[in-house]
Image: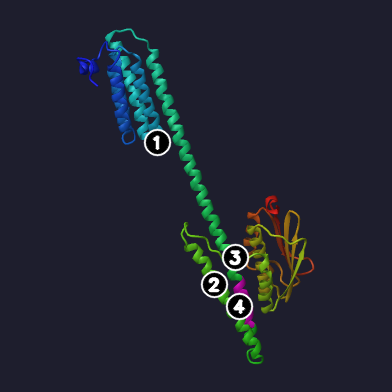
Amino acid sequence: MLQRPDELSHLVQYDGNIEDAPLLATAIVTTLGALLLFRAPLAAVAVALVGTVFSIGMAVRETTFVLFLLADAAVGYTAATRSRRLSVPAAGLCLATLAGYSVWQLARGTFFNASAPAGLASTVAIAWLIGNTIRQDRAHTETVRAQATRQAITAERLRIARELHDMVAHAIGIITIQAGVGSRVMDTQPAETRKALEAIEATGRETLAGLRRMLGALRKGEEEPAPLDPVPGLAALGHLVGRSASAGVRVDVRRRGERRELPPDVDLAAFRIVQEAVTNVVRHSGTRECTVTVDYGRSELAVDVVDRGHGRGAAAGGSGYGIVGMRERVGLLHGEFSAGPLPDGGFRVAALFPIPVEAER
């Protein structure tokens, strides 16, 4: 390495050496700056400025500008990764160095070109603005991500609340009707009482199993596999009809159009609409029959539940939470929903779900 007689003196020679001193100063500043930049960026800026001041008297004037640009880079990095409490002093340190150099030159009475310090000051401002913009963009992205996460959590809580409401309300409605039937015929028709109790037991067991599955899914970690239990859909209408019949309400299911596989979210929402509407018929309508119409259109699915009971207004539609939940389900899928009494008596619940074109292929 040391091939010249006075190699060390050549390396540290300050003035007149165009080979070694500028390169040595640049190497030292770059190395120290890189070591300090990530942990102490303000110190890295200070090192670059010290190297800049040190290189002013060297024969290679470009070294001064190169080292000052290293300070600019450190300022930009500080503004991009640290708060303004740290980045503003870093930029101020550069500007103070330029101001001190200008005052020193004026005090000496030396003529110098003021455009050079002004140009370097503009590079400091540009570096800080670029870094600060990057930091603000990153902060904005984090804010948007946090808001999206909160919205997703809220939507999931509403979905769980709707599922629990639909599941429990339907089961409690069936159990209440069966318990009433059993209590009325307990003394005169023991066989009917036994059937009512068996229906209550079956409904209770099924509801408890559904609640356990839901709670188990909530307790699973994110990395655990999702439950493989089938999601209820319109294919489960037969089971719903059977449970309603055991509660004394006959459900006439009519299907129109060509039956085909539906998107899971549409299939589930349509089934929950029918389930909630039939539950309201069982609990509030006072009638013993209703009609469920499922119409498979080319690009939409229509669900219609009509009863001819004497219930009117909120009494026919339930407490109000069920209708709100149904409206939310349909709204989330960009569909149309209506629920209200009929002019000649009874109550009607109608939902129209658009089916995406991709789902038809």
The percent coordinates of residue 81 (x first, y second) are: 39, 36
Which amino acid lies under the numbered mark 1 shown in the image of this protein? Thr
Residue 81 is tagged as 1
Residue at mark 1 to residue at mark 2: CA–CA distance: 52 Å
The residue positioned 30% from the left and 27% from the top of the image is 46
Q: CA distance from mark 4 to mark 2?
A: 16 Å
Where residue 266 appears, as percent x and y from the top left, is 66, 58
Per the rendering, the mark at residue 209 is: 2
Query: Between tags 1 and 2, which lies in front?
Result: 2
Q: Viewer-nearest of labels 3 and 4?
A: 3
Q: Residue 175 has which mark? A: 4
Which SS class for mark 3? loop
How packed mark 4 is, by other alpha carbons closer than 10 Å (few <14, some 14-19, many 20 or more), is: many
Question: Within 10 angstroms of label 3, few (less than 14), some, or many (20 or more) residues?
Answer: few
Task: Say whether residue 222 is magenta.
Answer: no
User: Which comes before the other along the chain, label 1 or label 2?
Assistant: 1
23 relative to 292 in the view: left or right: left
Mark 3 against mark 2, which lies toward the viewer?
3
Q: Is residue 179 magenta?
A: yes
Q: Earlier in the sequence, mark 3 or mark 2?
A: 2
Compared with 187, 172 (above or below) is: above
Asked if 209 appears above or below 152 in the picture, the reply is below
What secondary structure is marked by label 1? helix
Task: Check disc 2: other Cα within 10 Å, few if <14, some if 14-19, many if 20+.
Answer: few
CB contact under 8 Å: marks 4 and 1: no
Q: Which mark is residue 67?
A: none
How far apart in space, not on screen, are marks 3 and 1 (Cα)? 48 Å
Q: What is the number of the mark on residue 230?
A: 3
